[in-house]
Image (tube, grey):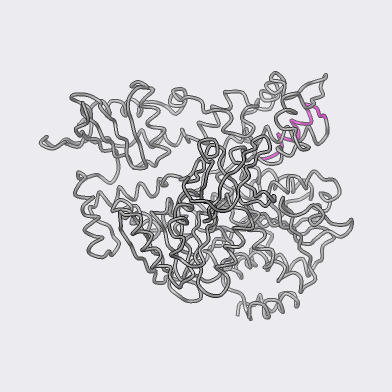
Amino acid sequence: MNGIFPGLHESLQEVLANRLGWSDLREVQSRAYGEVALGKDVMVIAPTAGGKTEAALIPVLDRILKEGSPGVACIYLSPLKALINDQEERFRSFCVPTGLEVRVWHGDVPRGDRSWSEGEPPHILMITPESLEVLMREGRPSRDLRHARFVIVDELHAFVESERGAHLRVLLERLDRIAGRHVQRIGLSATVGNPEEVLAWLSGDWKDRQLVHVAQPPREKRFSFYLEEDEQKRMEAIARIVSARKALVFVNSRAEAEQAGRALRGSVSHLFVHHSSLSPEMRKAAEDSIAGEGSACIICTSTLELGIDIGDLDVVVQIGAPTSVSSFLQRMGRSGRRGRSPYMAFVLVDAWDLLLCAAVIESASKKRVEPLIPVKRPYNLLVQQVFLEIIRHRRTTRTRLRQYLGTLPLFRELPENIHDLLLHHLEHEEFLVRDGEIFMPGPKMEAWYGKSNWKDLYSVIRGGGDLRAVTPDGELVGRLDARFVASGGKGSFSLGGKSWTLVKSDESHNLVVVVPGGETGGKAFWTGGQAGFSPVVCQAVQKILSRRRTLLPLLEPHEEALSGIIRSIPPLHSKGIHIWEVPGRRKLDAIALTFLSRSDNALLTALVRRIKGEKMKIRYDDLSLLFQDLAKEGAAEIVLDAFSQIQALSAQEMTDLMKIPPAENWKFGPALPLPLVREMASVDTWHMEEFAGWFSGLPLYRVPAPGEESCGKAGE
């Protein structure tokens, strides 16, 4: 016994003893309690079902119970409304027996249910960042935040790299202003590659902080691999694996989820599909199925990686390789509870899939996890905050805007003249109008963002690519990609594992009408479907190929399949780019094995075309670039020369070569001057400074074609 449990408030002790059967705290909870009690910002890292929610709740509830609170004492922030809905029951089971009130506030909750009477604020408020933005501007309810002492940010890693994360940081700083002091921050996260940096990002200017990471004791993990090129046989293998079991089947995109659901229908009982484009009701039905008695199977995307509690699982199935080590750890962590060994089955197309899986698992075993890189140029968010301040006061002055924006730590790091540059542009482009020193909403601001009482201003998430799919009775089924509807979505298709027929499209009201049934013909797709593999995974693939074997113990057929790939590739170094020639249709093709990741290979492709000509035929994936019909001779040398020229460029010179992405890629991008759009792209999309830094130091190797003498590093 560590001595903390007996000192907890008596009613909290009773809840822990009666609800969880605890007579003491786990190590992660004891350590978190001690650090929170000292007033530190804390980041708790633990796997799924590792006790991190209780690690945050116990010290917070203990403090509230012992000291009381006249207002909202704790704000729980989540990236997903579904996660709030899932956690609500857990929070209430702790709070209600102790007399503490919990209130949920987000867009799916009726307005009357999320508000409260004057003088009767909840002790715990569960909310999304976008809803907190709304609440902070609602007069009386926002005043109840003055007593806030704690903020719990769940699934912190889901925020850090996005503009929602930058928005979250601004909200936390504004909460400090409302409270008149630093509101203690507690972040909950799965394993990340740079936890200290993420904790510093969460804390901002507050230096008193502590990472709480209790390593899990090593335990056996079971993996099985099924390689099958025929899709029907792969689906039959999945049906056998999940038969009479509770199972999650992970895929890497919504389209793949629907495809697998369609293929497995009829061969798997209690089958559900779960992804972000399905209605909350359909997702909840899937979650309830796995938490109930008997067998059930959910085909899902990353929506079930996050902390939604789905209970005990017998097996996790992965179709294809996970795209990141972090994702793999989250998915594997869904199985192996209650003392059982985690079991994950991989259903793969070929040995290349197996190679990628081996790279993921090897990286995880060596604790090589992707670092999280926060947004550094949040100009999109800056525009949002300017607009929100103006509608908050109806009109405002340049001095007031500079005072508000310039004192927020996130914006203090931006160039000094950025506010004047932005305000001048917004006025020039008629997003704002000025009367003397007073700024007011301009015609463009009202036309683009003024609908539904400025509702679009409260989120930095760009929308507009989806249409609501509803039945004739108005029941929401999910969301369909506008491009899918426009390109022939009429007819039957699969959504949520069920067949639907599209009967009417009304884009002016952002909806399509669907009815159940019909022969499933069309395959629904969504823009921006599958992400590429992370650089950590790609670099691990290179290490496996350079050593000519994997460290994983594989069955003989799988070992032989992997050996076949290794034999087909020339010997490689563990670092650097390897280039060789192969016959093309008319001329020689050149292959460059880069192992950079899909996004960096896309960037490299664009730079090569700027240098060598836009008509150059280049195809790229996560690991390589293929240059087609390049030359009758010396194809590899052309590529080597292009890469050498790029290595000699500075980050700014690379950025100047690139085409500026459409401003519409960012929600408030159309309100930004082009130089700031270019800077956002360079710093936060292309990560050009980092790319230029390490690309310039990569060795370039000319690999001999069959019959050629061995060639070494370029320039030797």
Residue beneath the point at 56% across and 70% down: 311
Relative height, residue 123 to residue 163 (above, below): below
Position of 493 compared to 427: left or right? left
* Residue 402 included in the magenta stretch of the image: yes
Residue beneath the point at 60% across and 63% down: 285
Relative height, residue 635 to residue 503 (above, below): above
Horizontal and vertical percent position of residue 657? 44, 23
- Residue lying farthest right? 118
Q: Quadrant of the N terminus?
A: bottom right
Position of 14 compared to 438: left or right? left
Position of 606 compared to 92: left or right? left
**Near-viewer residue (250 or 697):** 250
**Near-viewer residue (304 or 227):** 227
Horizontal and vertical percent position of residue 408? 70, 39
* Stretch of the chain drawn in magenta: 395-409
* Residue 273 included in the magenta stretch of the image: no
Residue beneath the point at 30% across and 47% down: 542
Relative height, residue 646 to residue 312 (above, below): above
Horizontal and vertical percent position of residue 186? 64, 58
Q: Main secondary structure of the magenta part?
A: helix
Which picture quadrant has residue 332?
A: bottom left
Q: Quadrant of the C terminus?
A: top left
